[in-house]
């Protein structure tokens, strides 16, 4: 084996998460350690960071299109009965609470303030062009979905894909064999496409350590040690938001349905931990199912629908993360967001959470979508701030995935209780 192939095989042998973390630390350490503003090194490394951002942007439209269509069309219309409506209502309400909590944390802790990246930008507008509220809703409906895709106009793409997905769900369920068969072909096509896109994401992520190193080096070499604080601040803000979601939303739901919040959290520990380490709601699904079945007394007829749909569309932790990080980036880049932009962030974060696949790192791609929806182009300083978030993504993903899964479990318990189907003998303390 030559020296070069030895280095390469060593690179691929080390676990990706560790590689990214090592790259993060190295980028920060060298960025701070080398003389500040080392123009030559910055000039050399900048394209490596830019390449990473470009690779991610390359994936965003196809991945959103495919996973949203597959996600919405996997809900069988027949199941969209009472249980379905209740679950979706619960998902919507808790997601709304999550984005409000996320934005509140972002206002209180002001992540990104003081990290002035605006001068590192080549060309970004200082004020995003916030449309009026009625315009926001109108803009959600594309006049030509293909034009929206070509322009990467995310919100209209989401609307179109949801219509398409629901239409597909009905056709898949049709009594007419011909319609059913063609609909299944279309479904399989999009399912295959999203699998392929996830494969591509895996490859892109193999490049992530290099991209993260370059992005971190550039930020810390330009800003010095002053950039460490904001990174810790944004992480802390997200985690405080996650804890508040448990305290203010899930604990209150437990009290409303008469079960002990502490007992709920104790029983939910195995899936929460599995989600924390795997960073995948989908991967945690078997553990969640086992827990609600064996320890929480939720009947299969309810969790069989509520949990898989939740793992696809209900992402409370991701919503909090999106809110906090969007504000972090706008603060760091000195972009003024008006009221219209905040409303757009609320709407897109909710929709983006629906479109987030339950796999590691999917939420970070959705952050691009939220940013672009308020007119923040991911280039120049915004690209750098986004790279900083990306560098911390593993740590942020652990917490948010854990919360995503907890939200799904809570929904299945709530639906079962309100349907009078929760086996209360499984619960020690009834309130
Ligand atoms: N990893 C998360 C999940 O599986 C999605 C995300 O990246 O936010 O739920």
Image: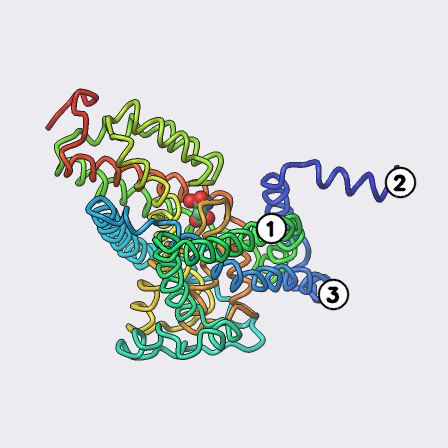
Color encoding of the figure: rainbow
How far apart, in angstroms, are the residues tagged by discs 1 and 2?
Answer: 31 Å
Q: Residue furthest left?
A: 431
Q: Position of residue 313 (x, y in %)?
A: 36, 50
Q: Which label was assigned to residue 2?
A: 2
The picture quadrant where one finds residue 246 is top left
Q: Is residue 1 above or below residue 337?
A: above
Tell me, for residue 388, which label it has, or none: none
Query: Is 137 on the left-hand or right-hand side of 184?
Result: left
Compute the Cα span from label 1 to label 3: 17 Å
User: In front: mark 1 or mark 2?
Assistant: 2
- Kindly state the secondary structure of the residue where label 3 is placed: helix
Q: Tag on residue 28?
A: 1
Which element carries disc 2, helix, strand or loop?
loop
Mark 1 or 3, nearer chain start: 1
Q: CA distance from mark 3 to mark 2?
A: 30 Å
Location of the N terminus (image quadrant): top right
Q: Is residue 68 above or below residue 414?
A: below
Residue 127 against residue 109 in the figure, above or below: below
Determine crowd level at label 1: few under 14, some 14-19, many 20+ residues with C-alpha closer than 10 A. many
């Amino acid at each position: 084996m030559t020296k070069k192939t030895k280095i390469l095989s060593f690179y691929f042998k080390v676990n990706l998460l560790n590689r990214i973390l090592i790259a993060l630390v190295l980028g920060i350490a060298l960025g701070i350690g080398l003389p500040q503003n080392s123009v030559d090194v910055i000039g050399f490394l900048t394209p490596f960071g830019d390449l990473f951002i470009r690779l991610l942007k390359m994936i965003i439209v196809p991945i959103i299109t495919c996973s949203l269509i597959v996600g919405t069309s996997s809900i069988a219309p027949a199941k969209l009965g009472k249980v379905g409506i209740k679950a979706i209502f619960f998902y919507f309400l808790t997601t709304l609470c999550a984005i409000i909590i996320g934005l509140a944390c972002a206002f209180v802790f002001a992540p990104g303030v003081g990290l002035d990246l605006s001068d590192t930008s080549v060309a970004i507008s200082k004020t995003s062009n916030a449309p009026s509220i009625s315009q926001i809703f109108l803009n959600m409906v594309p006049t030509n979905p293909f034009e929206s895709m070509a322009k990467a106009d995310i919100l209209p793409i989401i609307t179109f894909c949801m219509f398409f997905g629901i239409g597909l769900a009905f056709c898949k369920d049709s009594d007419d064999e011909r319609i059913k068969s063609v609909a299944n072909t279309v479904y399989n096509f999009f399912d295959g496409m999203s699998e392929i896109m996830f494969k591509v994401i895996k490859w892109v992520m193999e490049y992530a350590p290099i991209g993260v190193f370059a992005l971190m080096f550039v930020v810390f070499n330009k800003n010095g040690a002053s950039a460490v604080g904001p990174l810790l601040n944004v992480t802390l803000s997200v985690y405080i938001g996650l804890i508040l979601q448990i305290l203010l939303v899930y604990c209150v739901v437990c009290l409303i349905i008469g079960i002990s919040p502490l007992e709920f959290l104790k029983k939910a520990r195995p899936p929460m931990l599995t989600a924390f380490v795997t960073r995948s709601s989908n991967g945690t699904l078997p553990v969640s199912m086992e827990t609600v079945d064996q320890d929480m007394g939720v009947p299969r007829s309810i969790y069989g629908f509520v949990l898989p749909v939740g793992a696809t569309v209900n992402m409370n932790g991701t919503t909090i993360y999106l809110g906090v990080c969007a504000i972090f980036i706008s603060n760091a880049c000195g972009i003024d967001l008006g009221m219209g932009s905040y409303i757009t962030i609320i709407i897109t974060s909710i929709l983006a959470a629906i479109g987030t696949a339950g796999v590691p790192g999917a939420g970070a791609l959705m952050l691009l979508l939220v940013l672009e929806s308020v007119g923040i182009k991911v280039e120049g300083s915004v690209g750098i701030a986004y790279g900083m978030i990306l560098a911390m993504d593993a740590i942020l993903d652990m917490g948010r995935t854990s919360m995503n899964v907890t939200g799904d479990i809570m929904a299945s318990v709530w639906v079962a209780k309100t349907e009078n189907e929760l086996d209360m003998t499984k619960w020690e303390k009834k309130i």
